[in-house]
Amino acid sequence: MYFIHRNWEAGPLCKSVRHVPGRTVLEWFRGLWEPDGLDRAHSDLNGAPYELEWLRECGDTPPEDMVELRRRIRMQLWADKELHIDDHSIRISSMGVHLEEAFYFVDDARVAEQPDRWTYPLHPSWPLPDAAAPGPTPFVAPFPCAELAPSTTHDVGATYVLLTTLNARHDTLGWDRTYVLPGVRLPQLAAALRRPVQNRDNWPGPLLDLRALTAPDEDGIAPALERLSRFAGGAGELPEPHDQAHRAALEHLRTVTPDDGRLPELTLIHVGEHLAQMALHADSIGHRPWFVFDDIWASAHPDLAASLIHYAYHWDPGCTRKHGFMMPCGHEEYLDLRLRYADRVRDYEPYDEPLVTELTGARSVAELRRQIFQDAGTGKQRLLLVLDQDHRSELFGVVGAVLGHPTPDACELRYFRLGKPHRHRPEQRDRLIKALCFELRKEGYTNLVLDQPPNELCQKRLNPVTLRGTSPTSQVISVADFYPPELYALRADPFLL
């Protein structure tokens, strides 16, 4: 089993990697109940995470399988952010003491199955290998990268630019796009950066800084990277053309000193023929890894390159869900939505039965299912739970939905039960409807059918996220017209308008 702790303060690559040979994830967690199991676990993980003691409060015996382990983790640990679990891995996003962090437990077998996801997360230390000989097949990025400029020549090749950033305390893992300059390889990058920039708004600020700090007579970017480690930023405001921007950047470098605890002497730079990498010491928190590589290096290390791009883009290396940039993540088999406060919506699992029967009054979940899903035809039945994770996954809502009913492109919302009056939030039903509309739209459904027409508050919350002309005044809402709010990417809760 491998354990990865993704942490902004954990050195040049902002992560630490530990390997526990001879045990799967399930076997390792079961070992917590062995004599001295907690001490051994903390040694395996180098002291993190600290909440492992709480797992033993969930039972006197170790979990029998991953389903039971998932139940205990969901009920007892890491409830503040994301939790994704399958048969061979556990991936957790959590709000640490100061900044967001992530924990990954993954079996050796899963790593072998998915090298294009796990090679970079498992790379133990700075720097990455820079040896490069063209691989047998051209490199293909795991998803489209942002193209900075069209190629001005018929040259083959491409250079990829990946600059990790830390702009806030929340939503800081992932969200870093990889940019590509087609027709350019790393040996020609300095010359390409000196070309006029057509769409400056499409360029990330740090890359404009690197461009301005590249001298007119330099063949490589190593000197510019060294200057950038001492540069306070803001080249996007410098004059054009490039020679004027470079002179202004040098004057800025001479007169302005970076603050916020940046120590240029701690910045690490390693430049090869086809890979340039920098661990920029940016502030008192620590480093920001940067990688600039071309298609030759990527074709020589395809799994490392693909997993690096995915790791920067997404907090979860094991995510199997295709979704847009800065869109909520999910899992192909489990729905997991974040609503307001700490409320979550996820699929029912067998261990939830006592909570569901207590809330609904049904004698069993089987009986409840029969009541909700009779005459559902071939539609996919989903029993969803609404939970407050601030209180150890306290259940206060049950939802019944049928996918593909009454038509193949529709979802029928058949049942909605909120309990515990002191926890009742009058807007909760409406927020859930809107969240489901976004989720269904991603899956290609076109209509949401309600058990009753939306009330006035529901209409008010739906209108800002539907196209002009949509009027959700009946029992059918067209989800094909939904689009993300303009500030979607900046919201911790995208369903809060």
Image (cartoon, rainbow, N blue to C red):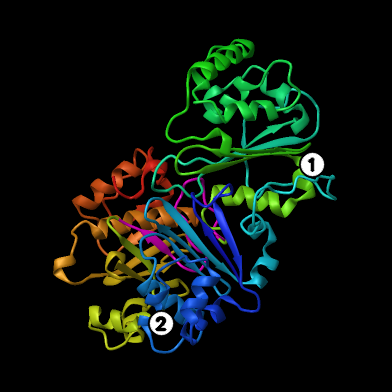
Query: For residue 329: magenta?
Result: yes
Q: Nearer the viewer, residue 396 or 229?
A: 229
In this picture, is 474 found above or below 196?
below
User: Residue flagged by tag 2: what amino acid is it?
Assistant: Pro
Q: Is residue 140 left or right of residue 29?
A: right
Q: Residue 123 placed where, x, y %?
A: 66, 56
Q: Nearer the viewer, residue 413 or 84?
A: 84
**Disc 1 or disc 2, which is closer to the eye?**
1
Region rendered in magenta: 319-339
Please tell me which residue is depicted at 34% across the width and 50% down the height of the picture: 493
Label number found at residue 350: 2
Find disc 1 in the rendering and name its residue: 296
In this picture, is 288 found above or below 88?
above
Please state, as top left, top right, bottom left or bottom right, where the N terminus lies in the image.
Answer: bottom right
Q: Is residue 301 left or right of residue 179?
A: right
Q: Nearer the viewer, residue 270 or 112?
A: 270
Of the numbered discs 1 and 2, the one sitting upstream in the chain is 1
Which element type, helix, strand or loop, lies under badge 2? helix
